[in-house]
């Protein structure tokens, strides 16, 4: 009896089963989606001392409506996280801590706006995020701020609890699955005049 | 054993076709910041400041208008502020415009009065003049007594243009150069509106004086750096004096981004 083919087949079977288990272990949810996920452009124009001194706030510049559904056969491990990152287009030569310069007015002898001049507040009615209602800032390109942090234990929807990350939808649990984004810039008189840009990327992922 | 192999292959195929990736969605919010430069000079002053010399004491002691002009600065960028004497050029680019003359046409009576005979004094010293190299960096010195001619307050003039003063000349705030070092040659952005205390780098009270002297030669007239006298005798020779008449000129205050 030749045992080598048998051992090879059994080995292949074991490897496959491991792969199968691992591959399927990454998917606990049936749907993970931000609605709508179209991009938003916000213009903040500073053309008076009132705005320079007092700052400029746009409340509700975007709404992150989360929709996470179970698979047909519900997986109790289905949960999600929501983070935001900042992007200043470093490929254009932007220094790591500054806004991307699109155009400059005047002599440009001063400092271009720094990323931390942009303040962001994320909130929902239940206050499910630990940073709910607080203006937070980024410092450098690709910095990450957690709204609902990754890899937290599953907190089911429906109880208005902190870090709610179980399956649900803004349609059924609006107060937990709808995040309103506010932005504020208070430049003072520190920065070069000009046109500058930053991109905030909101990323919704299922926890693996 | 072949069956085991086939089963394995079939399951692997089935398994591979059902492998799923982690579910992700993203949304972008792009913020564009339009920082428009705002330089604002608020000036409180009479439309016209008149110096009428009709008394001999006024020739001797001069006439001073205290606090005739108040300058209030608001700027979102680093800035400089200076004053420059100008006229329409009737008598030449650096002279007062003679509107009318009184009296005869004595050859010693000079109709060309230098713009620099007007003296300014600023109440708040220039705190952005570290890079200045001239004898007088601003107009903050006291008016000199009539017996001691000095150019510390004579108005900056540059050929009838509004060209900015050099490092040798006078600014009200800030100075020539772009060192980028605060206090050296610029004033930092800000506004008089949120300043506390009696003094502010964004608030300047300006006094004016004209001192003709007797004879009326205007001994306080000096060139831009305050080093060379421009009184009528120094320029025209002994015996010269100002022709009586009505003269006009204007002072241009210029607020600009640090340069």
Image: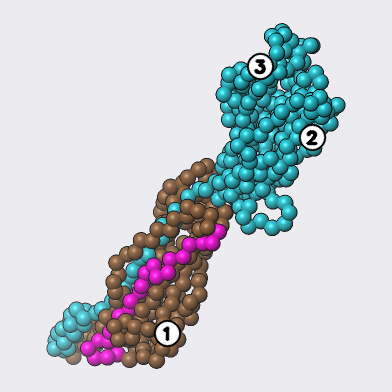
Q: Nearer the viewer, residue B45 or A10?
A: B45
- Circles 1 and 2, Cβ within 8 Å, touching? The answer is no
Q: Residue at left 58%, top 30%?
A: B162
Circle 1 marks a residue in which chain?
Answer: A
Between disc 1 and disc 3, the foreground one is 3
Q: Nearer the viewer, residue A135 or B227?
A: B227
Classify mark 3: helix, strand or loop.
Answer: strand
Q: Quadrant of residue B3?
A: bottom left
- Figure colour of chain A: brown
Location of residue B171 in the rendering, given as x and y in whole percent from the top left corner: 67, 37
Q: Which residue is mark 1?
A: A126
- Figure colour of chain B: cyan
Q: Quadrant of residue B33?
A: bottom left
Labels 1 and 2 in the same subunit: no
Q: Is residue B81 above or below residue A130?
A: above
Span highlighted in magenta in the image: A53-75
Q: Give left or right: position of A103 versus B17.
A: right
Q: Distance between the Cα atoms at labels 3 and 2? A: 29 Å
Location of residue B236 in the rendering, given as x and y in whole percent from the top left corner: 73, 13
């Amino acid at each position: 009896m030749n045992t080598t083919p048998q051992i090879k087949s059994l080995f292949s079977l074991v490897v496959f089963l491991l792969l199968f288990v691992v591959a399927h272990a990454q998917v606990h949810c049936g749907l993970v989606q931000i609605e709508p996920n179209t991009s938003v452009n916000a213009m903040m124009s500073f053309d008076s001392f009132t705005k320079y001194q007092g700052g400029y706030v746009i409340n509700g510049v975007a709404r992150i409506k989360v929709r996470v559904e179970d698979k047909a056969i519900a997986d109790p491990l289905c949960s999600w996280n929501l983070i935001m990152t900042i992007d200043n287009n470093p490929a254009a030569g932007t220094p790591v801590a500054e806004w991307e310069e699109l155009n400059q007015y005047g002599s440009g002898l001063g400092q271009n706006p720094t990323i931390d001049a942009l303040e962001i507040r994320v909130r929902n009615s239940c206050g499910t995020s630990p940073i709910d209602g607080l203006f937070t800032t980024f410092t450098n390109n690709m910095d990450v701020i957690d709204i609902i942090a990754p890899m937290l234990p599953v907190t089911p929807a429906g109880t208005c609890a902190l870090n709610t990350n179980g399956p649900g939808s803004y349609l059924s649990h609006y107060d937990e699955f709808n995040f309103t984004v506010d932005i504020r810039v208070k430049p003072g008189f520190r920065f070069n005049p000009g046109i500058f840009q930053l991109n905030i990327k909101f990323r919704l992922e299922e926890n693996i | 054993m072949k069956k085991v192999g086939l089963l394995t292959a079939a399951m692997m195929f089935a398994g591979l076709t059902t492998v799923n990736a982690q579910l992700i969605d993203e949304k972008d919010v792009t913020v564009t910041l339009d920082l428009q430069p705002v330089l604002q000079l608020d000036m409180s002053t009479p439309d016209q400041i008149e110096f009428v010399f009709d008394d001999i004491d006024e020739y001797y002691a001069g006439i001073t208008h205290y606090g005739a002009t108040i300058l209030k600065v608001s700027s979102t960028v680093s800035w400089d502020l200076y004053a420059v004497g100008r006229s329409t050029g009737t008598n030449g680019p650096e002279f007062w415009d003679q509107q009318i003359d009184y009296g005869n046409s004595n050859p010693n009576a000079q109709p060309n009065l230098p713009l620099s005979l007007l003296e300014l004094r600023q109440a708040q010293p220039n705190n952005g003049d570290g890079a200045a190299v001239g004898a007088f960096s601003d107009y903050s010195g006291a008016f000199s007594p009539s017996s001691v001619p000095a150019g510390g307050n004579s108005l900056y003039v540059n050929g009838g243009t509004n060209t900015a003063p050099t490092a040798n000349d006078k600014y009200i705030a800030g100075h020539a150069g772009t060192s980028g070092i605060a206090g050296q040659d610029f004033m930092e952005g800000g506004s008089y509106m949120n300043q506390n205390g009696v003094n502010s780098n964004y608030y300047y009270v300006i006094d004016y004086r004209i001192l003709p002297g007797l004879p009326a030669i205007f001994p306080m007239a000096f060139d831009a750096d305050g080093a060379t006298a421009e009184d009528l005798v120094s320029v025209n020779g002994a015996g010269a004096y100002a022709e009586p008449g009505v003269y006009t000129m204007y002072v241009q205050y210029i607020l600009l981004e640090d340069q």
